[in-house]
Image (cartoon, coloured by chain):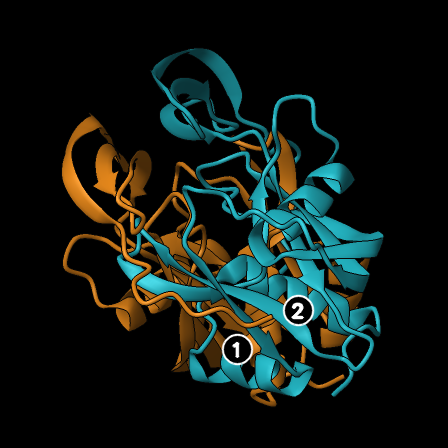
Chain colours: A cyan, B orange
């Protein structure tokens, strides 16, 4: 059943930015298809982001619960946030962890990266494990974000992936990467 | 460390659709924050999509390899596709599986759903397990998609999640949901 095709690439012919925004831009490009035809591609350009798995020594994981306006729902997710201009992913992870949860990590380790929605966006998520957690006494939450903290055991987190308590792709994928690399105790 | 906040919701004040496209629309809304302030939210409205884990009786999994224009890369992903207007997710899963891979499933089982990018989009991905795979003799691939088929054991798939051979969030998350529900043999 395996088929081979010599060239899968789509090549840009022309395009335009139809919206330039605060967290994303939207481009519409005309592309040349491998079969010689043409198509339009709608592309959300995103600066990239980080997701953090904050892990206590006893195996519990810190999540955030927040209203996600696009979905109209309150969701439980791992802490995350987009890269500021020129910001290194590890620095962003440390910053977002503290801003969102009030915890500061002694160690921040990269577990990999993935695309969130390669069909319509270039957003890359850098995945970090944060350990050696200490309360940041001077913690001042971001004024634009209303966030609750949820602390679950790894077993509770996996159960939430199964039963719909977690509905966020990056959170599910990150828990899996951590489990595959031996960091989740269940 | 657990904090409680009585109301996390952001409420729309007004907004506009700045782009209405083929696979997505972009809205920019002004919202009232729980703290009484205001902010703008850029929201990609998406019709929703399906992702399919096609599983052979011997435990191998069917993936597709295709150029993803937004990322500029050729990626290995589980078969997936967006819902047509009014289309039921299970019907979409059966259709996309056959269009992209040439395999037809005797059984299509829903394993759940998740949001791909709740920070900026309402896209929902419905997850399906496809078993009882039979070659569709009348298979005609979508003319706009140049796709190669990749068939891996579950162990190869998990190794690809670990080593970067799979860089797609929905694929990683779907493999995890299938593993958590006992469908992956490793």
A55 up-or-down from A95: above or below: below
Question: Of A157 and A101, which appears nearest the observer?
Answer: A101
Position in image of residue B130 (x %, y %): 46, 77
Camera sees residue A2: yes
B6 up-or-down from B120: above or below: below
Please give left or right for residue B52 compared with residue B32 in the image. Answer: right
Q: Residue at x 59, y 29 (%)?
A: A9
Camera sees residue B23: no
Please give left or right for residue B180 compared with residue A28 in the image. Answer: right
Q: Mark 2 near mark 1, Cβ–Cβ under 8 Å?
A: yes
Question: Of B140 and B173, which appears nearest the observer?
Answer: B173
Q: Circle 1 sits on which residue?
A: A161
Gap in angstroms between the C-alphas marked 2 and 1 = 9 Å
Q: Residue at x 47, y 42 (%)?
A: A119
Label disc, if present, on residue A175 of the rendered structure? 2
Residue B75, quarter of the rendered image: top right
Count of labels shown? Answer: 2
Q: Residue at x 37, y 25 (%)?
A: A39
Q: Residue at x 39, y 45 (%)?
A: B142
Determine whether the residue tagged by mark 2 lies in a helix, strand or loop: helix
* Mark nearer the N terminus (2 vs 1): 1
- Quadrant of the frame with the N terminus of chain B: bottom right
- Quadrant of the frame with the C terminus of chain B: bottom right
Question: Of B7 and B19, which appears nearest the observer?
Answer: B7
């Amino acid at each position: 059943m395996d088929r081979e095709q010599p060239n899968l690439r789509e090549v840009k012919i022309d395009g335009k930015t139809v919206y330039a925004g605060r967290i994303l831009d939207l481009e519409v490009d005309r592309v040349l298809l491998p079969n010689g035809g043409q198509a339009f591609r709608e592309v959300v350009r995103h600066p990239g982001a980080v997701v953090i798995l904050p892990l206590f020594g006893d195996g519990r994981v810190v999540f955030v619960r927040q209203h996600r306006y696009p979905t109209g729902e309150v969701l439980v997710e791992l802490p995350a946030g987009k890269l500021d201009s020129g910001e290194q992913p590890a620095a962003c992870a440390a910053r977002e962890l503290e801003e969102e949860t009030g915890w500061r990590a002694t160690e921040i380790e990269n577990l990999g990266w993935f695309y969130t929605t390669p069909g319509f966006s270039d957003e890359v998520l850098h995945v970090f494990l944060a350990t050696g957690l200490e309360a940041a006494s001077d913690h001042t939450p971001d004024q634009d974000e209303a966030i609750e903290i949820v602390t679950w055991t790894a077993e509770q987190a996996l159960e939430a992936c199964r039963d719909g308590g977690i509905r966020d792709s990056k959170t599910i994928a990150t828990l899996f990467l951590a489990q595959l690399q031996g960091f989740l105790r269940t």
